[in-house]
């Protein structure tokens, strides 16, 4: 079967290729990809090429299909998996395989397995690890976004706290505590806010920082009312306007510092601010992955020793985290669409991936079987002047707080 795919040939070398997939083996599954959301990690992979830890050295000879946040439909099932999976089933998957100690993952490491394509082959290790799952939801994008949401969920679960003289780790963010999300108005920060407002261990106070007023305003409009209903004090602040950000952020919670702090930007000033606002027994989670393998910043080791500051980092979630995301979305208490600001077709994917930092906004959601320039949801109404189909999308999204939704996806797939 022929497939079209955005493939990595080398550093900063992404191409939309058309090629023949091999016939599947008895332990493989052929799938049709419908949606893939572009991750900043894919940008890092695309710019580093074979220098990336997850990319194979011979990627120039065996290009890797990009994209790892994808969902779609099963086309053909190898004999070994026909008892569990059937053609026509919808699927999603957890790409953080960690198979036999390797860092291989779809979207980085496989010639015939990734999300930025029309069709791909699921290799046997994905089923062996139970990372390939039937998806029973309505909208493909929610399955795609379950992967990035699982990263935020996993980060919350990985945090831990201790009591003086007791060496048992209490897992998760501190319930009823003070939580800070630094540089938290990007897509992953928005996902974390959404999760914090509905998870089973909720903070009492949540402070979200950024240096972009438009992003802060959008985030506040999305979450302020929900926070009130959840009984959580939620504050959005622009640290660029603060003379002494560390002091002012600590003063906002009584001067004692925070119980949990997440850093969502690989910027030394952000990481150092996280250390400066830590309270006793604070868990610092460096969430944002840097491209520079020598990235470093100052850390207050006095607090590490005397105030029991815990320093950690998380990358990716696990299958349980992904299932939790899907279940919360199905219940209607978690809306992963808050992360999405742009929609596009496969023909826009390569350029979008390589220019992510310049584009701004949140998640870019790609539908792989359509041709469509990357378009901001906020621009749908204006685009209707040149393409009447955008008027329908604008009508649907404007009724939904200008967020992407199942009805918008259904309209897109029917009209493009």
Image: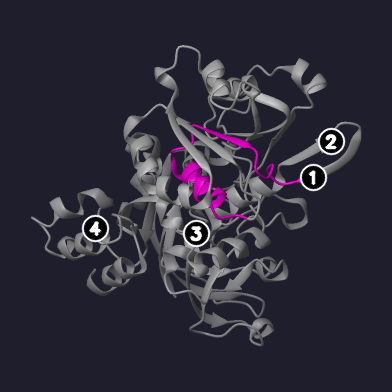
> In the rendered view, how is the structure colored?
one colour
- Disc 2 versus disc 1: nearer the observer: 2
Judging from the image, what secondary structure is the residue with disc 1 in? Answer: strand
Residue under the point 65% across and 43% down:
176
- Residue 325 visible to the viewer: yes
**The magenta segment:** 170-199
- Disc 4 versus disc 2: nearer the observer: 2
Alpha-carbon distance for marks 4 and 1?
Answer: 43 Å
Which residue, as the protein is rendered here, is positioned at the far top?
Answer: 243
What residue did someone put label 3 on?
334
N-terminal of the two: label 2 or label 1? Answer: 2
Q: Which of 155 and 309 is in front in this view?
A: 309
Residue under the point 61% across and 54% down:
105
Residue under the point 60% across and 38% down:
287
Labelled disc at residue 398: 4
Q: Per the image, is 185 magenta?
A: yes
What residue did someone put label 1 on?
170
Alpha-carbon distance for marks 2 and 1?
Answer: 9 Å
Judging from the image, what secondary structure is the residue with disc 4 in? Answer: helix
Q: Quadrant of the C terminus?
A: bottom left
């Amino acid at each position: 079967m022929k497939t079209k795919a955005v493939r990595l040939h080398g550093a900063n070398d992404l191409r939309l290729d058309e090629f023949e997939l091999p016939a599947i083996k008895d332990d493989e599954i052929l799938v049709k990809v419908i949606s893939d959301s572009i991750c900043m990690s894919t940008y890092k992979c695309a710019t580093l090429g074979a220098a990336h830890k997850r990319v194979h050295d011979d990627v120039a000879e065996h290009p890797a299909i990009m994209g790892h946040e994808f969902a779609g439909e099963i086309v053909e099932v190898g004999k070994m998996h026909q008892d569990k999976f059937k053609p026509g089933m919808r699927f999603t998957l957890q790409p953080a395989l960690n198979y036999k100690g390797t860092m291989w993952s779809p979207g980085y490491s496989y010639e015939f397995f990734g999300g930025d394509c029309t069709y791909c082959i699921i290799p046997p290790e994905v089923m062996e690890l139970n990372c390939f799952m039937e998806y029973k939801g309505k909208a493909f994008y929610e399955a795609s976004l379950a992967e990035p949401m699982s990263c935020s969920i996993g980060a919350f679960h990985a945090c831990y706290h201790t009591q003086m003289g007791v060496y048992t780790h209490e897992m998760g963010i501190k319930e009823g505590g003070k939580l800070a999300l630094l540089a938290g108005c990007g897509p992953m920060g928005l996902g974390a806010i959404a999760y914090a407002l509905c998870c089973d261990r909720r903070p009492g106070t949540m402070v979200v920082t950024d240096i972009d007023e438009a992003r802060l305003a959008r985030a506040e409009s999305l979450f302020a009312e929900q926070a009130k209903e959840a009984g959580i004090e939620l504050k959005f602040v622009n640290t660029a306007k603060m003379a002494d950000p560390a002091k002012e952020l600590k003063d906002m919670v009584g001067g004692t510092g925070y119980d949990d702090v997440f850093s969502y930007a690989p910027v030394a000033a952000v990481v150092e601010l996280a250390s400066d606002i830590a309270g006793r027994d604070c868990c610092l989670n460096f969430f944002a992955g840097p491209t520079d393998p020598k990235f470093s910043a100052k850390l207050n080791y006095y607090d590490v020793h005397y105030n029991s500051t815990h320093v950690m980092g998380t990358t990716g979630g696990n299958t349980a985290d992904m299932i939790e995301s899907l279940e919360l979305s199905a219940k209607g208490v978690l809306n992963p669409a808050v992360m999405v600001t742009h929609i596009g077709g496969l023909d826009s994917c390569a350029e979008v991936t390589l220019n992510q930092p310049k584009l701004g906004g949140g998640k870019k959601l790609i539908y792989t079987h359509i041709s469509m320039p990357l378009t901001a949801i906020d621009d749908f109404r204006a685009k209707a002047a040149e393409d009447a189909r955008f008027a329908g999308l604008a009508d649907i999204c404007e009724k939904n707080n200008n967020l992407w939704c199942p009805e918008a996806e259904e309209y897109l797939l029917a009209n493009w």
